[in-house]
Each structure stands twice: as C-alpha cells, then as structure tokens.
Image: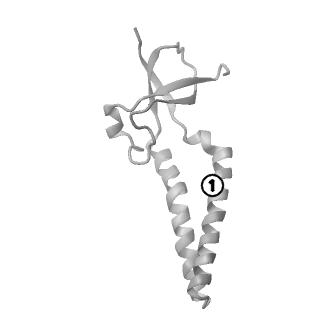
Amino acid sequence: MNEKECLVEITKAAACGSCALRESCSVETKKIILKVPRREMEIHEGELVELRIPKSRAIKAAFVIYGVPMITFIGLLSLGKLLNFSDTSALLLAAGGLVADFVLIHFYDKKRGKDFSPKIARVLKAER
C-alpha cells in the first residue's frame, strides 16, 4: 500500500438505502475490503469514514455498463434485420456486438475505472 491509498473495510449500513448505487452494489452483509484514494486528509487505522460516489458518475457508470450494451444489441439486431439477415444471423451479429462491448468496457475500466471508485468524503470518528 502506498501513501496515496488506504484500505477501507465496507459493511452495508442503513445509509445504503439512500446511495445512488444501492440497486447495483455488491455489498451485502459480508464485509469487503476496498482500496480508495487517501486524499489530503489525515486518516488513521480504525477510524470510521464516509465514502461517496457523485451521482453524476454513478449515472455515467450505469449507462456505460447497461445502456451501451443494450443500445448496441438492439441497434445491431435491427441492422441485421434491415439488411435481410436471417434471424439467427442477426442475433449472432448482435451477440458479437455485445462481446465487443464487454471487451471495450473492460479496457475502459482498466483505464478510467478509478474515476468511478468511491472517495473518502470525511472522517466520522475513531473506533474504540
């Protein structure tokens, strides 16, 4: 771990009900460890912190993950039918587009994924 990042243990809380990502979040009752940027604040082990993801970034991430593949699938399926492909060929074209989308999203995540990761908003209190 370097000085610019810290490990945060996440547990689902009542506050999750108001989070923009509550429907797609993988945090259940289990605890997970997340690597987050430390920012310019003093944080010590055992302190309780608040994490935030701006709504605009959550919406953009949801569009990239769900919207782009759906638009690609429907667009390529329609194009296949417009070009008089058989149903099977049009479906294979659309499925190929989905595979290409998921590969592109994977590389996009590697390059820009940190833009969508939670950031420490504030330190709440130290654990006793």
Indicate left or right for 18 with 100 as reference. left
**Residue annotated with mark 1:** 105
Q: Tell me which residue sits at (57%, 20%) in the image.
A: 40
**Total label count?**
1
Amino acid marked by disc 1: Ile
Q: Tell me which residue sits at (66%, 57%) in the image.
A: 104
How has the structure been colored for display?
A: one colour
User: Can you tell which quarter of the image residue 81 is in?
Assistant: bottom right
Q: Dot 1: few (<14), some (14–19), or many (≥20) neighbours within 10 Å?
A: some
- Quadrant that contains the N terminus: top right
Residue 27 image point, x, y percent: 43, 38
Taking 9 as reference, is 87 above or below it? below
Taking 82 as reference, is 68 above or below it? above
Taking 81 as reference, is 5 above or below it? above
Residue 127 image point, x, y percent: 41, 12
- Quadrant that contains the C terminus: top left
- Seen from the viewer's position, the closer of residues 109 and 91 is 91
Which structural element holds mark 1? helix
Q: Can you name the residue that lies furthest to the front here?
A: 30
Q: Can you name the residue that lies furthest to the top here?
A: 128
Q: Tell me which residue sits at (39%, 48%) in the image.
A: 23
Indicate left or right for 16 with 45 as reference. left
Residue 49 image point, x, y percent: 45, 22
Taking 111 as reference, is 48 above or below it? above
Q: Can you name the residue that lies furthest to the bottom here?
A: 84
Residue 69 image point, x, y percent: 55, 64
